[in-house]
Amino acid sequence: MAPTFRVQLTEALRAAHGQLRAEIGEQSIYGFVVYTSGQAEFDYVCASANTEQALGKDAALRWSVPDWEHHDFAKAVSQLEVPGDRDDAKLYGDMVAALAALDKEGRFGKGAARAKVILNVVCGDMSEEFFVRGLKKLNPAPVAKRWITENTPGPYLDALEQKLPKGQRLEALLVLREALALDRDTPAVRAARSRYVTQYNLEPRIARFGSAAIPALIDAIERHGFAPAFNKPGSPAWKMHGAFTVANQLATGSAFLIGTCGVPDEASVQRLLDIVRRKVALDKKVGGHVSTLAENIARVLHRQLPERFPDTRMSGTTNHLLNPEDYLGARRA
């Protein structure tokens, strides 16, 4: 009987750790992780690690895993095939268990030495919740507690908002969210990342502004929703962000964020319907796999205005919106 994926991954990570120790000598590892494609769908795995010496003084990159000197450093891990008939909840458990097995072997030290190393399962554009979930599962409680106390984004974002006039806060949050989502290299992004802020941390704060935020979110959809939707499989962008491009993820995320901001006014509804109309027309020309954006916007319209828009139907194989006429032919309120 072939070994399970958990066993294969454990053995590959064990070999990877040995390879790393041979490469770095006496350098101090502060992070050793399994890096994967996303928070819920795991298409690949690779091993990544970094040392205090490799990090140097650039604190903003401490948990920017793709920028680590030893990101995806072990072929023994990256060449593993994720089971095709996978159960993603079980796969996450397998990744956690594989790292925990190495920790139990004492590979990351004991006592004070172990407290200096963080183990985790991570991905590109991960939420704080996803990071903290693995943090708590894989590290001693005091280590997890210290990290959460020192690095959660809340205090940083509170201070950011408080130093701005009320009339500028929404725009500042929207600009920072977009810059983080698109991996722009700006002083504001570097400062935010030094406190582990992601675009997902900003979304609840944007939602507090209610319907006032909706026009700007539609602007974001229009700017980025018509860019290429997919990364080339196996490319650096695919490994870092998964199947969908960062522009596409920003556009679809903006659509769902509208749904948490409140009911759009008629002008906003018409703008959203126009985007659906344009996307459906373009999707028909593609024929194969397309972005989920048209269906996502239609779904938000249904949720916010169920008496006017019926539920969506989407192709499970190509993502095409199957009932666009229910939206494009809808009467004005």
Image (cartoon, grey):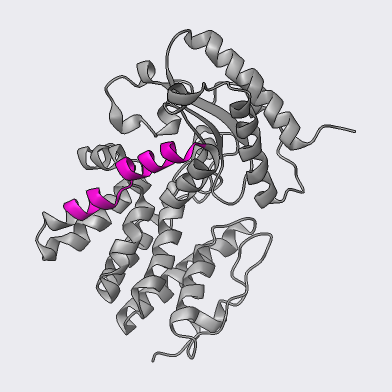
Magenta segment, which residues? 139-159
Q: Main secondary structure of the magenta part?
A: helix
User: In which image quadrant can residue 66 be found?
Assistant: top left
| Residue shown at 24% from the left, 73% from the top | 212
Residue 320: give x, y in percent of width and height: 60, 65
Q: Nearer the viewer, residue 195 or 210?
A: 195
* Residue nearest the observer in this picture, 143 or 86: 143
> Splitting the image into 4 quarters, where does residue 272 fall?
bottom left
> Can residue 180 be seen at all in this image of the molecule?
yes
Position of the C terminus, as image quadrant, is bottom left
Residue 90 appears left or right of 268: right
Q: Is residue 311 above or below residue 114?
A: below
Residue at position x 24%, y 50% in the image: 155
Q: Quadrant of the N terminus?
A: top right
Q: In the drawing, does residue 87 fall left or right of residue 124? A: right
**Residue found 17% across the figure and 52% down from its top:** 159
Q: Residue 94, position in %: x, y? A: 67, 40
For residue 46, side relative to residue 264 (left or right): right
Q: Which residue: 63% across, 23% down? A: 105
319 to the left or right of 174: right
Q: Work out whether residue 92 or residue 123 is closer to the camera in this orientation and state it.
A: 92
In the image, is residue 61 part of the stretch drawn in magenta? Answer: no
The residue most toward the front is: 111
Tell me residue 18's x, y (percent).
Answer: 60, 14
Question: Where does residue 25 sit, x and y in percent of width and height?
Answer: 48, 7
